[in-house]
Structures are given as structure tokens and as C-alpha cells.
Amino acid sequence: MKVSVVGVGYVGLVAAACLAEAGNKVVCVDSDEGKIERLKQGVIPIYEPGLTEKVKDNEKTGRLRFTTDLAEGVRDSLIIFLAVGTPSADDGSADISAVLDVAGQIAELMDGYRIIVTKSTVPVGTHKAVSDIISSKTEKPFDYVSNPEFLKEGSAVDDFIKPDRVIIGTKNPAVMELMKQLYSPFMMKKQRILFMDPASAEMTKYAANVMLATRISFMNEISGLCDKFGADVELVRNGIGSDSRIGNAFLFPSVGFGGSCFPKDVRALIYMGDKQDCPMTIALAAQQANHTQQHRFAGRVVEYFSGKTDVRLAVWGLAFKARTDDVRESPAVSCVRRFLEAGFKVKAYDPAAMETAKDVLGDTIEYGQDYDILDGCDGLVILTDWQEFRNPDFQEIADKLKSPVIFDGRNLYDPAYVRKQGFEYFSIGRP
Ligand code: NAD
């Protein structure tokens, strides 16, 4: 099929590369000229395991091409995916101006029937706003599909190729059939497409993300109470996760959730609820618990060093989670900011997110390699759950730090083992 994807970020580039690999001809359109130029030169602008090969291989075959010219994408495609950003506006709502802007431009460029598909996360009701804009600008026929994306950064390629489910929001049976065809290469084991109306599809995305954020916040609150009672949250996690009604996923206590999706989608759902006079009190509580969790952890580190001057901290992890270079709303970045406010000096290492972190933290901190940054520091703080942090050389850490203390915001280690190595060790919700 002939497809274009507008917005070539974490979602758009992955979707485009995977669709091209399935044999479709895909035009990638982005308004960021620098990004498109780099992609044309084979430079992949984001860190995402398995993506580089897919993009390069499919570009070579000619099935994947990049342009800043939306007209090229609209001219050459039947199906046009919108995967542009929908960041939070100041009032907490999702800013869908890029979606509406692109939809309007597409309408003006259409020379015949097109299917416009939203992959961006958009508030419930956006299907109507997009359809209205398109029909106000063209007489050409079109269909609109809401197709929210559920991939996770860090395993995005795998998630796209082997989705748990694909949600298709349309009422038109012919379009359902076409979308089924488009996704059929990713349904080899079993059919996992769920058809529904566009409003339900839009709502499903928010309900899923806020449910996951709520699980994390709930466990983080439980971890706080474990601290008070001397209980071990990891035992509690196993205890409840083994209940098949609950399951093990998304129960890991941590320094809080972050990233470009959960915080903004929680805010957007709260906003939608307020507007409809139907308060989203659980989402609100999940949001508050998340703030509390970040402050509690960073506050504990600050408190430990109270009264001490010239404190230097080594930080492992800046990305909002492992296997990504994304630092948008990263709890690691907010903790680092808290340390800087307390007057501490920070040296940081992240396997993939050092460059993206420089965009937000600049030269307020130093950057270096994992063990190099430990030299002369008063403690090590772990903020991202990278696999490579899980089994470190504790001897080398102890030798390099001024005093052997670890603050672990991801519960990566067995407390008894780390203490046996001579460390003072603080983690989340464990005695
Ligand atoms: P991103 O910021 O990485 O990418 C968005 C891209 O859109 C950028 O390259 C930007 O230059 C481009 N863009 C913006 N305005 C444009 C315009 N007018 N014309 C052409 N290009 C334009 O964003 P992302 O993380 O890929 O997220 C995209 C959407 O998908 C968001 O709505 C997000 O909530 C949703 N989503 C994201 C994830 C995720 O893990 N990142 C997962 C599921 C859904």
C-alpha cells in the first residue's frame, strides 16, 4: 500500500520503518528540516533498539523515503498517518494544534479520496475537530480513523511488529477492511485488531496510559508506607503480582513515572474530566503521588548531606527509563535539579541520554563515563533502570567514592549484598 507518515519522531519513525519493512511504500514527512536532512544521510535522530537497521535497510530498497514536503506525501499516498506531537498546554490540556494544522494542510493538498489516520494521542472528540477542518477545506471525499499507538520507547520496534492489540476507530466497514489488510503482516500468530468508534478509540488510549500510571503511583505510595512500617515493598510486589487478577507488570516502585506520555496524558485526562464536569479523581491522585515520590527520594538524598558543604554527587541515569534517550519529564532530571538547588555539584552518566540531557540541563552539571564520574564524589545516586547498572563492580565504586553510599531510586540491588560490600545503601520502600 502507499502510505505516508507525518511527524517522524519516536512513534512516526518506528511506524514508518515497520510499515515499509512489510512491503508498503512509505513517505515520511516532517517539518524539521535538520531531522529530515540527517535521516536522508542515514543518521537516526533517536536512540531506539533495532530501529537504525530497519530505517537504513528500507531506505535502501526505496520503500522508505524522507521529505519536508507534505504535498509529496499527500500526492503519493492513500493512507496518511498523523504522528506529530501533542504536548501539554499550560492548562494541562493536550495541545492538538499540530494535528489540526497538518489536517488542514492535507485537505488543501488532496486531489482525491484519502484516509487520514491519527496515531498521535489526542483528546476524545478530536476525530470530530479533524473531520470538520478537512471538510471545511475540501470537497474531496475522505475517511478518518483513530488508531492510537501503544508502543513503548525502548522496545518500540518489537511492540509495533508484535502488538498486544491494534485499535482501529472507524465506523466504515470498507476502511476497517483496508486497515486490517495494512496491519495483517503484524498479525501472523493471531488477529488482534479491535474495531470501535473513534471516540472509544481515543478514550482507550488515555484509559490505558492513566491506568498504568496509576499502578505505578499506587506502588510508590505503598513503598512509602513500607518505609514507615519496616516492610519490604519488593516482597509485597511479588506477593500481589502473583495474584492473577493483578499480574506483575507495572508494579515496580521507583523514583516516579515520567517520559513524554504518562505525565501529559494524565494531565489531559484530568483536564477532559474537569471540562465535562466529571472529575478524574484517581488520575489526580496518581499525579500527586508521582510528584510526592520524586520529591521524597531527592529530599532523602539532600537530607542525608544536610550541614555538609561542597557535596558532589555521581548520578547514573538521566533518561526517564532504560533503553531510551528520552529525557522529557524524566524523574532523573527533576531529581538532579533538586540536587542543584541544594547547592550540590552533580556529575552524570547515561548510556544513551547524555546528549538529550545536555539540551535540558546544559552545563549545570558535568557529564562523563560511568566509573570516571565517581572519582571524589560523596555518593552515587541511581535514577534510571539501565541493565548495565544492575551488576556493577562494587569494589571499584567504593574505591572511587569519597564515602561508600548508594541511593538507589530503582531498587536494582539486594540491600543485604550491597551492605556486605561495605556500602551504606538507601532504596525505595525496603528496610
Ligand atoms: P516526537 O516529538 O518524538 O515527534 C513528533 C514529530 O512531529 C517531530 O519530529 C516534529 O518535528 C514533527 N512535527 C511537529 N509538527 C509538525 C508539523 N506541523 N508537520 C510535520 N511534522 C511536525 O513525538 P512522539 O514521542 O513520536 O509522539 C508523537 C505522538 O504519539 C504524541 O501524541 C504522543 O503522545 C504519541 N505517543 C507517543 C509514544 C512514545 O512512546 N513516544 C507512544 C504512544 C503514543
Image (spheres, helix red, strand yellow):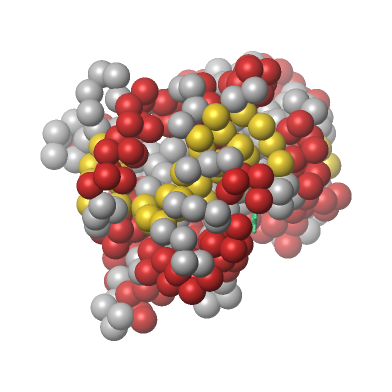
The number of callouts visible is 0
Q: Relative to residue 186, is residue 89 depicted above or below?
A: below
Please name whichever residue, 210 or 194, is drawn nearer the observer in this view of the structure.
194
Point 26% across, 52% down: residue: 172
The answer to whether residue 126 is seen in the rendering is no
Please name whichever residue, 198 or 267, is drawn nearer the observer in this view of the structure.
198
Where's the C terminus, which quadrant? Answer: top left
Q: Quadrant of residue 307?
A: bottom right
In the image, taking residue 327 as reference, residue 276 lies left or right, namely left
Q: Quadrant of residue 35?
A: top right
Q: Relative to residue 191, is residue 85 depicted above or below?
A: below
In the image, taking residue 358 as reference, residue 330 lies left or right, namely left
Please name whichever residue, 332 or 39, is drawn nearer the observer in this view of the structure.
39
Point 46% across, 38% down: residue: 152
Point 72% across, 60% down: residue: 342
Expressed as whole percent of the image width and height from the top left, the position of residue 220 reads 38, 50
Q: Relative to residue 128, is residue 229 depicted above or below?
A: above
Expressed as whole percent of the image width and height from the top left, the position of residue 256 reads 48, 50
Expressed as whole percent of the image width and height from the top left, the position of residue 36 reads 74, 40
The answer to whether residue 396 is seen in the rendering is yes
In the image, taking residue 430 as reference, residue 304 lies left or right, namely right
In the image, taking residue 44 as reference, residue 372 lies left or right, namely right
Point 52% across, 77% down: residue: 91
Expressed as whole percent of the image width and height from the top left, the position of residue 132 reads 43, 72
Please name whichever residue, 413 or 126, is drawn nearer the observer in this view of the structure.
126
